[in-house]
Amino acid sequence: MLKFILRRTLLMIPQLILLSLVIFMLAKAMPGDAITGAFMGNPDATPEQIEKIREKFGLNDPWYVQYGRWLGKAVQGDFGMSYTHQQPVTTLIAGRVENTVLLSLFTAIMIYLIAIPLGIIAGRWTDSWADKLIVTYNYVAFATPTFVFALLMLFVFAFVLGWFPYTGSVDIKIESGTWAYMVSRAEHLVLPVMSGAIIGTVGTIQYLRNDIIDQKTKEYIKTARAKGVPEGRVYSRHILRNSLLPIAAFLGYEITGLIGGSVFIETIFSYQGLGQLFIQSINLRDFTVVTALVLISGTAVVVGTMLSDIILSLVDPRIRIE
Amino acid sequence: MKNPVLEIKDLRTSFNIKGDYYAAVDGVSITVHENEVVAIVGESGCGKSALALSVMGLHEQKNTKLDGQVNFGGQNLLTLTRSRLDKVRGKDIGMIFQDPMTALNPLATIGRQIEEPMDYHMKLSASEKKKRTLELLRRVGIKNEQRVYEQYPHELSGGMRQRVVIAIALACDPVLLLADEPTTALDVTIQAQIMDLMKELQNQMKTGIILITHDLGVVAEMADRVVVMYAGEVVEIADVKELFENPLHPYTRSLLNSIPSNMESKEKLHVIDGIVPSLQNLDRNGCRFAPRIAWIPQEDHEETPEMHEAAPNHFVRCSCYKTFYFPEDRVGEREYVATNS
């Protein structure tokens, strides 16, 4: 088991190198560089001076030297300076990472809290009114874009009813570290989390429902019933264990996938997270930030896939590699 | 005669197809005695598996209608609530399934799966359960039982898995075993091993067995009594020796005639005309086998075919057996046109 995890972790290294290479190439392929941005059109800068600065910053070196330098720094957590914010990219990201992690984590938890019971009800009592209701919700939610639903939530619960704040991640007047501060953070999280979860959960519900319906017809379920296993146990011990397998396997992927993925939600709720920073940076052509964020979310996906593989190998004996 | 263990009386199992109910098992009555092996034979679709699943209450309830009686241990299984039925299944009746590749839960160890019925039917401690399970594994011919106990189904071969399926059925010392084509999904050498095992177990355990199969070789080897089913009905019941020596019903005779008997002969293999009609297309009036023996005149069949005791303990349905013949035996004697209706 340990050997498998180790091997799977080592496999990540070439994936990450490839990812960083692609991102670096894309960044290089974009027109202009840091110097053109800073000095172009400045009448005091002669072409000789610009050339000198280029040489000084190593921009005339071959691409692989530049790549090596960039990667070396990135590994140490140095992604350079943000042009628009005039502070290191790392500092900029660090200030937002907590917000995004909180949002992603609670959204993921909410997704499973909704999906597992609803999926089980719909799958176990197929064609009942409860199932029909859940399936209808699925279709409607599937067809609703997140940003439309988030705006609706914002309008109803923040604007009309006024139950929750409609912007930011915390009330700025409250001192950090106090109980009131925590409560304020939680209040600010409710709408973004619910908007993301209510829409994001439908795939999982549908998957679980269909898998339960599929497992129900399997021969080993007949074996279980023929053993005299009560119906409740047939579900909990046989059907659900098999049906939750793919869901569990998706867990790692889902959690890390959310880290870069809450662009809409963060933007609509003006929630100070990485997604919002990403969109702002793209609009401002702040490419050091964009590159760093793409690298981070890309890494998150690679790590997530690895987590999924490890989870699956833990829960499914057929995949266990000795 | 020994005590009856199971009495099936006029069992009718109907399935809902597009709003109407069609009987797949149509008024079947069979009695199984202690220590008796009753084989149920017939083509695919004749209702033999549906019969076994009806006895066990394993049909999907929503689209199935069960009528008649399945008397076992002083109660009619068809009228029991689910929780009462669960006290019988796996304890007094064990079931062996057809396909060992799918009959085991892929996520549970072999040990767990054999112990599961004991959880519900026997008051045993964990160590007693394990001891019993290891003993069962040995009894079904698994030699490295300690290892297999910890293994998962995918680590075992088909023959080994079928042994495990048998061990599950035997876990709580049932008085009746239902074996639904226990060797069909296995390859020939393994089939023989499993059949030997079943025979050996039957000799030791003295349980009643219902053996569902379409393999007449298996029937000859194992059964005491044979029930031949066609299109949901019993067409012939006889002791195994009697049935093979003196088959009466045209269907039974056709089945026996379809076995290639002599490897060297270049004779054409006998084929029964037509197929078993589907549930919706089955004509339920008159002799159901009549369309497949079209050369027998209609007046030789009964209008509502009944079971007749043609010889002591040898029952046969419809009167058409009296005049039935194979056309190839009488080429030239009488004109006939083969039809595939």
Image (cartoon, coloured by chain):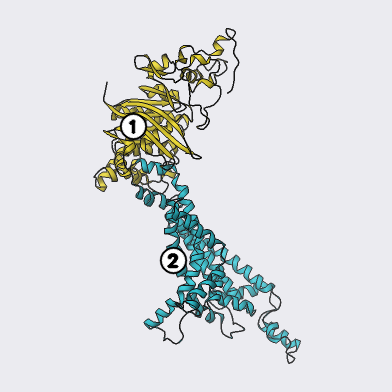
Chain colours: A cyan, B yellow
User: Is residue A315 in view?
Assistant: yes
Q: Position of residue A84 (x, y in %)?
A: 61, 84
User: Is residue B182 in view?
Assistant: no
Q: On screen, A297 above or below B273?
A: below
Q: Residue B170: give its label.
A: none
Quick check: marks 2 and 1 in contact, CB under 8 Å? no
* In front of the other: B104 or A133: A133
Judged from the image, the secondary structure of the residue bearing numbered disc 1 is strand
* In front of the other: B128 or B91: B91
Query: In the rendered image, which quarter is residue A183 located in?
Result: bottom left
Q: On screen, B309 above or below B130?
A: above
Q: Is residue A32 left or right of residue A215?
A: right
Amino acid type at image mark 1: Gln
Q: Residue A109: give its label.
A: 2
Residue lying at 60% horizontally and 10% vertically, measured from the top left? B335
Judged from the image, the secondary structure of the residue bearing numbered disc 2 is helix
- Residue assigned mark 1: B69
Q: Quadrant of the N terminus of chain B?
A: top left
The chain letter under disc 2 is A
